[in-house]
Image: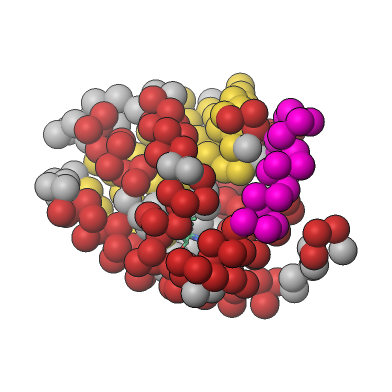
C-alpha cells in the first residue's frame, strides 16, 4: 500500500470511471486548471501541433468529451475535413458539444457515443485517431489500441496524450505530494468529491510508462512509434503509424 494505493477490481473500476466523469463533467475545466496549474492547455496545444493533422483530414478524437482536442484540430482539417468526437459518456459528450457550438464550431464536427474498445467504424476510415487523457480510463487498452489501428487508413497515425512516468528524480517527491495530498483536497474543496480525485492519482500511477505503452502500440500493429515527454514526463505523447 504505497501512498494508499489499492487494487480496484474491474467491475468496481468501471463504476468508478462512470462516476468520476459524470460528477465532474460540469467542473471539468476548473479542476483541470487547478490540478495542472493551467498547463494542460499547453500540453493539448502541443499535442495538436505535433499531430500532423492537415486540411481535408478525417480525424477521430476518442474520449474527446470536453471538446478541447476537437477545438484545436478542427481549424487544422479545414472546411473539407471532419472531426468525429467519440466518448463513452453521454453527459461528457453533451458538455463538449455545447462548448464547441458556443465557440461557433459546428460544421465538420460529429459526435458519437462509443466505447474505444469497440469502434463503430469500418476499417481504414480515418487519417488520424487521437486520444487525450482517455486511454488511462479504458479497461482493455490492448483492444482499444487494436481498434485505433484498425480504423486508420494506411499511412494514418494514432496520437496518445496521457500521464506518464516522471523522468526527473528531483521532481518525484513534489509530484507525489501534489498527487496524493493536494489533488484529493482540491477534489474535496472544488468538486465535493475526494474519492474520484484520489482515484485519478492512483490510475496515473498504474498506467503503463513510456516504454510499456510504446511496446503495447507495437504489439497492436503500429510502426515507427515515437515518444515525446512533456513537463519532464508528467505527460507523454506517443505517436505511431499504420503502414
Ligand atoms: N480528451 C478530453 C480532454 O483531454 O480534455 C477528455 C479527457 S477525460 C479525462 C476522459 C474521458 O474519457 C471522459 O470523457 C470519459 O467519459 C472518457 N472515457 C472513459 N472510458 C472510455 C471508453 N472506454 N471509451 C471512450 N471514452 C471513454
Q: How is the image coloured?
A: secondary structure
- Note whether residue 178 is visible: yes
| Residue situated in front as seen by the camera: 216 or 195 | 195
Q: Is residue 155 magenta?
A: no
Quarter placement of the N terminus: bottom right
Image quadrant assignment for residue 190: bottom left
Quarter placement of the C terminus: top right
Q: Residue at x 63, y 37 (%)?
A: 234
| Residue situated in front as seen by the camera: 234 or 67 | 234
Q: Which residues are magenta?
A: 165-182
Q: Is residue 225 left or right of residue 166?
A: left
Q: Residue at x 46, y 38 (%)?
A: 39
Q: Residue at x 57, y 43 (%)?
A: 162
Q: Is residue 176 left or right of residue 234?
A: right
Q: Is residue 197 above or below residue 48?
A: below
- Note whether residue 130 is visible: no
| Residue situated in front as seen by the camera: 1 or 147 | 1
Residue 193 picture location, percent across and down: 53, 73
Q: Residue at x 45, y 57 (%)?
A: 31
Q: Is residue 14 above or below residue 243?
A: below
Q: Is residue 41 left or right of residue 231?
A: left
Residue 223 picture location, percent across and down: 61, 26
Residue 20 picture location, percent across and down: 52, 69
Amino acid at each position: 500500500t504505497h501512498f494508499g494505493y489499492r487494487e480496484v477490481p474491474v467491475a468496481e473500476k468501471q463504476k468508478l470511471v462512470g462516476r468520476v466523469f459524470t460528477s465532474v463533467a460540469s467542473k471539468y475545466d476548473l479542476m483541470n486548471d487547478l490540478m495542472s496549474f493551467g498547463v494542460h492547455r499547453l500540453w493539448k496545444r502541443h499535442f495538436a501541433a505535433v499531430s500532423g493533422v492537415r486540411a481535408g483530414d478525417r480525424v477521430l478524437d476518442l474520449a474527446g468529451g470536453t471538446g478541447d482536442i476537437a477545438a484545436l484540430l478542427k481549424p487544422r482539417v479545414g472546411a473539407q475535413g471532419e472531426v468525429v468526437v467519440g466518448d463513452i459518456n453521454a453527459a461528457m459528450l453533451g458538455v463538449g458539444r455545447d462548448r464547441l457550438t458556443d465557440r461557433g464550431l459546428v460544421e465538420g464536427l460529429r459526435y458519437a457515443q462509443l466505447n474505444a474498445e469497440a469502434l463503430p467504424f469500418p476499417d481504414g476510415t480515418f487519417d488520424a485517431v487521437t486520444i487525450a487523457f482517455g486511454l488511462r480510463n479504458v479497461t482493455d487498452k490492448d483492444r482499444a489500441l487494436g481498434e485505433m489501428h484498425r480504423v486508420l487508413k494506411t499511412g494514418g497515425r494514432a496520437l496518445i496524450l496521457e500521464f506518464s512516468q516522471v523522468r526527473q528524480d528531483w521532481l518525484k517527491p513534489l509530484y507525489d505530494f501534489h498527487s496524493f495530498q493536494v489533488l484529493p483536497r482540491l477534489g474535496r474543496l472544488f468538486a465535493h468529491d475526494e474519492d474520484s480525485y484520489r482515484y485519478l492519482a492512483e490510475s496515473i500511477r498504474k498506467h503503463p510508462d513510456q516504454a510499456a505503452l510504446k511496446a503495447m502500440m507495437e504489439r497492436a500493429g503500429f510502426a515507427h512509434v515515437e515518444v515525446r515527454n512533456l513537463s519532464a514526463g508528467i505527460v507523454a505523447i506517443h505517436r505511431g503509424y499504420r503502414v
